[in-house]
Amino acid sequence: MIGIISDIHGNLEALEAVLEAGQRFSINRWVCLGDIVGYGPNPVECLELVRSHCDVIVKGNHDDACGCFAEIDEFNQIAKRAILWTIEQLKDVDRDWLSKLPLYVLEEDRMYVHSSPYKPYLWHYIFTESEARRQIQHLPQNIRYCFIGHTHEPFRFVSDNKSELINVGSVGQPRDYDARSCFVVFNESLGKFHFCRVEYDIERTQQKILDRGLPRFLAHRLQLGN
Ligand code: ZN
C-alpha cells in the first residue's frame, strides 16, 4: 500500500493526523507530491516529518519559491507574505534541499508530479476534464497512473485508454469545502485507490497562524475548507 500526500503547507496538526491515519492501512511507502511549506505555521517541522517518512518527494511551486525565490512575484499578496515568512524560518541547508527536489518521479507504471505531466515547471492547474484529457496525452509510455496535487481539490479522470489522472487533494489546506485533510491510499497490486479524509485540530493550527503574524485569511480558510 502506498500513501500519497500533497500540499501540506506547513500544517503540522494535519500532517500528523494523516500519518497516524495511514497506520490503519498498513502503508509501507509514502509519497509526497510537494508544497510541504508555504501558508502554514510549521514549515520546519513539516519538512522534517516528510523527510523522515516519505520515500519519494517531488517539488511544489511553494517549495520552489521558498527554496530559491523562484517566480515569487507570480504569487498573490497573501501567498507571497507567507512565503517570505517561511523563508525566514528555514535554514539555508533546508532551502537548498527544497530547491533541489525533482519536478517529477517515474516509478513502475506511476508518475508523481505536483502540477501536471506536461511541462511541470509551468505549474499548470488541472481543474477540468478537458484539461485533464489534454494533459494525460503527455504521460510517458508505460505510465498508467499519474498522481498530482496543486489545486488542493481531489479529482479523478480516466482516459479512453484507461490511464488515470488522480489529484490526491491537500493535507494542510483543502479547498473542496471539506475542511478535513485529504490523501490517497493506493493498492499498487490491485491498481485500486481511495481518497481518505481525516479530521485534525484546526483551531490549534489557526491559533498558531495568528500568533506568528501570518495573514488572518490563512487561518479562516482552514475551517471553510476552501
Ligand atoms: Zn499547494
Image (cartoon, rainbow, N blue to C red):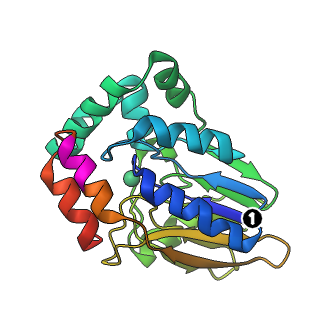
Q: Position of residue 107 (x, y in %)?
A: 77, 53
* Mark 1 CB lies closer than 8 A to ligand 1: no
Residue picked out by circle 1: 27
Could you tell me what secondary structure mostly forms the magenta stretch?
helix
Q: Residue at x 66, y 71 (%)?
A: 185
Q: Position of residue 210 (x, y in %)?
A: 18, 48
Q: Amino acid at mark 1?
A: Ile
What is the magenta range?
Answer: 207-211
Please name whichever residue, 141 or 28, is drawn nearer the observer in this view of the structure: 28
Quadrant in which the N terminus is drawn: bottom right
Q: Position of residue 20 (x, y in %)?
A: 61, 63
Residue 129: in magenta span = no
Residue 210: in magenta span = yes
Q: Along the horizontal axis of the image, is 107 left or right of 172?
A: right
Please name whichever residue, 201 or 191, is drawn nearer the observer in this view of the structure: 201
Quadrant in which the C terminus is drawn: bottom left
Describe the element under mark 1 as helix, strand or loop: loop
Could you say which quadrant of the image residue 24 lies in?
bottom right
Could you say which quadrant of the image residue 5 lies in?
bottom right
